[in-house]
Image (cartoon, grey):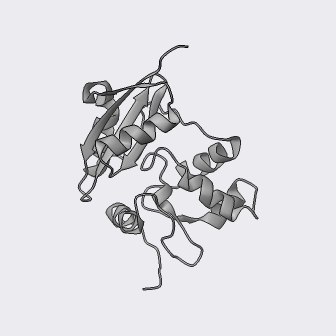
Amino acid sequence: MIEQTIYYAKMKTPLGVHLWIAKSGRGVCRIEFGHSESEFRAMMARVWLDARLINDGKALQKPLAELKQYFAGRRREFTFRQFMIGTGFQQLVWQAVSEIPYGQVATYKMIAEKIRCPHAVRAVGHANGSNPLPIVIPCHRVIGSNGDLCGYGGGIELKRRLLEFEGAAWSQKR
């Protein structure tokens, strides 16, 4: 068996929470908000069973630089290689979500309609929740049809902060 090496690093964000970013030989494969290093390593080990995990920010220079540019308001799209493991349906959802412009929102229903599965709103929500690359695949831009900020792995407050950071307009019951 060939051993896979995954490089990872921690990055501070201006949102009051740090993120972890990981990269395999095929590209950036995971971004997670919060967590301790041991929790992040355990999560990675469940997905990448035989991987050797190495904390090395130098191996992630380009993605870290691009994320820092995003959080400084100087980048809206990412150019580093990405590698996401997911079902065909998840890949369709992630592609559709990746097309939501910076500073805008779409509903789960709109995504379901875009991928030609108009009755799969809940499945879209589940796939969106399985997104391994938040920020890059901007799942925070997907909201409920009624304007609710529902379903975000980093928590609703972080979703709100990301949308406010991008200047997104949405109506929500308050």
In the image, residue 143 lies at what x, y percent?
Answer: 53, 68
Tell me the residue at 36%/61% (across/down): 162
Tell me the residue at 61%/60% (across/down): 125
Q: Classify 151 as above or below 59.
A: below
42 or 90, nearer to the observer: 42
Q: Point out the image quarter for the C terminus.
A: bottom left
In the image, residue 50 lies at what x, y percent?
Answer: 49, 24
Tell me the residue at 63%/43% (across/down): 91
In the image, residue 43 lies at what x, y percent?
Answer: 44, 42
Identify the image quadrant of residue 154: bottom left
Q: How many numbered marks appear?
A: 0
Q: Taking the image as drawn, is residue 3 in sight?
A: yes
Q: Point out the image quarter for the N terminus.
A: top right
135 or 50, nearer to the observer: 50
Tell me the residue at 37%/37% (across/down): 41
112 vs 34, left or right, is right
Q: Classify 59 as above or below 41.
A: above
Q: Classify 82 as above or below 69.
A: above
Q: Taking the image as drawn, is residue 99 in sight?
A: no
136 vs 72, left or right, is right
Residue lying farthest bottom? Answer: 174
65 or 158, nearer to the observer: 158
